[in-house]
Amino acid sequence: MSLPLEGRSAVVTGAGRGLGRAEALELARLGAAVVVNDYGQPGREGLGAASAAPAEEVAAEIRAAGGRAVAHTGDVTDFAQARELTGLAIDTFGSLDILVNNAGILRDRMVFSMTEGEWDAVIRVHLKGHFNTTHFAAAHWRERSKAAGGPVYGRIVNTSSEAFLAGSAGQPNYAAAKGGIVGLTTSTALALAKYGVTANAICPRARTRMTEDVFAGFAVPDEGLDPLAPEHVAPLVGYLASPAAGRVNGQLLVVHGGMVAIVDRPRVQAKFDSKQDTFSYDELDALLTPHYADRPAGETFAAAEVLGLKRG
């Protein structure tokens, strides 16, 4: 019996540790050849000297288990290096079929204290990094589709966060980047559907370097798999990368600890029509102020209404 991803090749960014590592191992277990990308900086803030070790160690782990893998240690925020990354999959394995964007950093700060550099760094790694690799993968699949005269196989899995869904007071840069990734994903899904390519985003909750302080109060169990282990997330990525998920496109899914939730698009909560040609201040005051009168001060729409989920 063949494996679901046998004959396919994948690029996974940020795959030297944590979620990316678990996802790369899962794709390889399902039969994919994997390009393991990681810039290899030691801290979650994206500071310190880059290192080839994390990517090379995961690639070696895949090969030791009988799979195929190569390491790539480039920076996905660099347009040229993102081109090299997608090209490496094509040159090494003959095709690029799956792109999993996972690379990220944190520079947490309240919005009134955040520096321009802290904002730019997080937006660059998360949002621009997702765009760069998506751009080159999309161009490759479009070319292949035109040459084939029909749809080809392509899967994109992007990494958003519950910080975008439910808010995160000390992460305005991170929450904004993760929201932007959802917009990038849905736009890409619409643009590439005719070529046979799907694009989806996940909001994973897992214990990694990125979330060590978030889950500091949740102890690792003495026995059994940690409910916050990245291994709970990886199977969904494997599924979304597979032929079975051909009809799943432009979706946002929350995943952690044996749970998957499909997030619906925003819905209209209430609607008000002016009784005049246009609204006046007084009319809006009479309509909207009573509507929000029972809402606790400081409560946002997301924190109140999205799945009851907290920051992740």
Image (cartoon, rainbow, N blue to C red):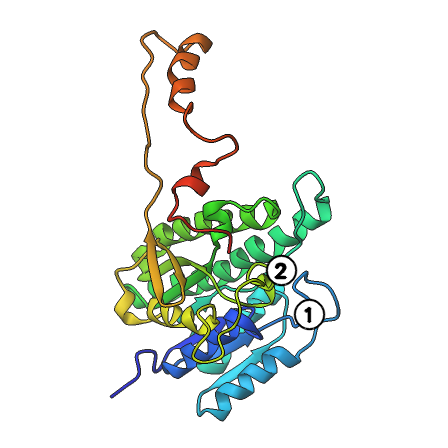
Does residue 76 lie above or below 311 as drawn? below
Residue 89 visible in rendering: no
Residue at 47% across, 72% down: 229
Disc 1 from disc 2: Cα separation? 10 Å
The residue located at (39%, 83%) in the rendering is 29
Tell me the SS state at disc 2: loop
* N-term-proximal mark, 1 vs 2: 1
Q: Position of residue 294 (x, y in %)?
A: 41, 26
* Figure quadrant of the N terminus: bottom left
Amino acid type indicated by mark 2:
Ile
Using the image, determine if residue 303 lies above or below residue 88.
above
Q: Which one is in front, 234 or 122?
A: 234
Look at mark 1 in the image and give the residue it sits on: 41
Figure check: 182 above or below 134: above
Q: Quadrant of residue 216?
A: bottom right
Residue at mark 2: 105
Q: Is residue 53 left or right of residue 281?
A: right
Q: Secondary structure at mark 1?
A: loop
Front residue (pair 90, 13): 13
User: Which residue is at 36% across, 81% downward?
Assistant: 30
Q: x, y (%) of residue 233?
A: 42, 68
Question: Residue 21: percent from the left, percent from the top?
Answer: 52, 75
Report the disc number at residue 59: none
What amino acid does circle 1 point to? Gln
Q: Eyeballing the image, is 104 above or below 66?
A: above
Q: Is 275 positioned to the left or the right of 134 in the image?
A: left
Residue depicted at x 52% and y 62%: 133
Q: Report if residue 182 is visible in the image.
A: yes
Check if mark 1's residue and mark 2's residue have beta carbons within 8 Å.
Answer: yes
| Residue 248 % position (x, y) | 29, 59
Q: Is residue 245 left or right of residue 135?
A: left
